[in-house]
Image (cartoon, helix red, strand yellow):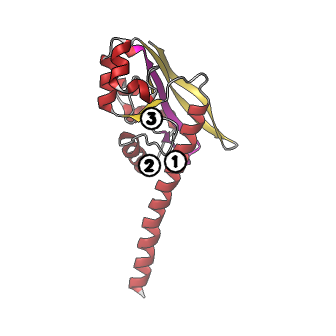
Amino acid sequence: MKISFIISICILFFGCKDISRTEDIKKSEEVLLDVFSSKDGLASRCIAEDFQSHFLNSLPDLKDFFITELKIQDLDHFEKQFELFSNFKMGSELFPDMNIIQESQIEMYNNIVSEDEMVNSGLFEMGCEYGYYSMSKPFFNEDYSLALVEFANFCGHGLCGGGRTAIYKNKNGVWAEVKVLNSWIG
């Protein structure tokens, strides 16, 4: 009797973690699709596999920033979100019409100085002649009603681009921007 009770508790405990991870993936997809679809005039067909941060990487205390901006009180939740955020890789299942480019291709892109080099690199055929996009994994508060996301576009071989870091709130099933924390234009 005791053993079956303990097994039941373990199944319930570990099952809840899986549900939480599944919910996180689902919510992340919702946020990223809403954020990406709200950007007008997207020209490139390329998105970075690894997130390229301008703003978040410059903060001296990222933990305090996330906790303060998202009003996170549960440190276990913060740690889980931070792990998911740090290990995030963009996948083609989320944006099937986009080409996922890797770090080596981004380095190649940033070193290209002429149109001929672009054509010869293979990035032109991929649809990257107008640059590429980069998006962070959403960082959620405990009840998944708020998410912090950094979005950027890089173009002109490092000569132009822009991005923003913002908090989004789920309003009637749609993630809407509620607070801009940072924006930049290069």
Looking at the picture, which amino acid does disc 3 mark?
Answer: Asn
Foreground mark, 3 or 2, reads 3
**Residue position marked by numbered label 2 in the rendering:** 77
Give x and y (percent) for residue 51: 39, 33
| The furthest residue to the bottom | 1
Give the CA distance from mark 2 to mark 1: 7 Å
Quick one: 112 or 87, which is closer to the camera? Answer: 112
Residue at x 45% of width, y 60% of height: 17
Q: Is residue 158 visible?
A: no
Other residues around mark 3 within 10 Å, as few (<14) / some (14–19) / many (≥20): many
Looking at the picture, which amino acid does disc 2 mark?
Answer: His
Give the CA distance from mark 3 to mark 2: 32 Å
* Magenta residues, start to end: 138-156
Q: Disc 2 vs disc 1: Cβ atoms closer than 8 Å?
A: yes
Other residues around mark 1 within 10 Å, as few (<14) / some (14–19) / many (≥20): some
Give x and y (percent) for residue 103: 31, 31
Give the CA distance from mark 1 to mark 3: 32 Å
Residue at x 59% of width, y 43% of height: 145
Q: Earlier in the sequence, mark 2 or mark 1?
A: 2
Q: Quadrant of the C terminus?
A: top left
The disc placed on residue 99 is: 3
Give x and y (percent) for residue 15: 46, 66
Looking at the picture, which amino acid does disc 1 mark?
Answer: Glu
Look at the numbered disc 1 and give the secondary structure of its residue.
loop
**Residue position marked by numbered label 1 in the rendering:** 142
Other residues around mark 2 within 10 Å, as few (<14) / some (14–19) / many (≥20): some
Count of numbered marks: 3
Residue 178, picture quadrant: top right
Horizontal side, residue 90 vs residue 181: left or right: left
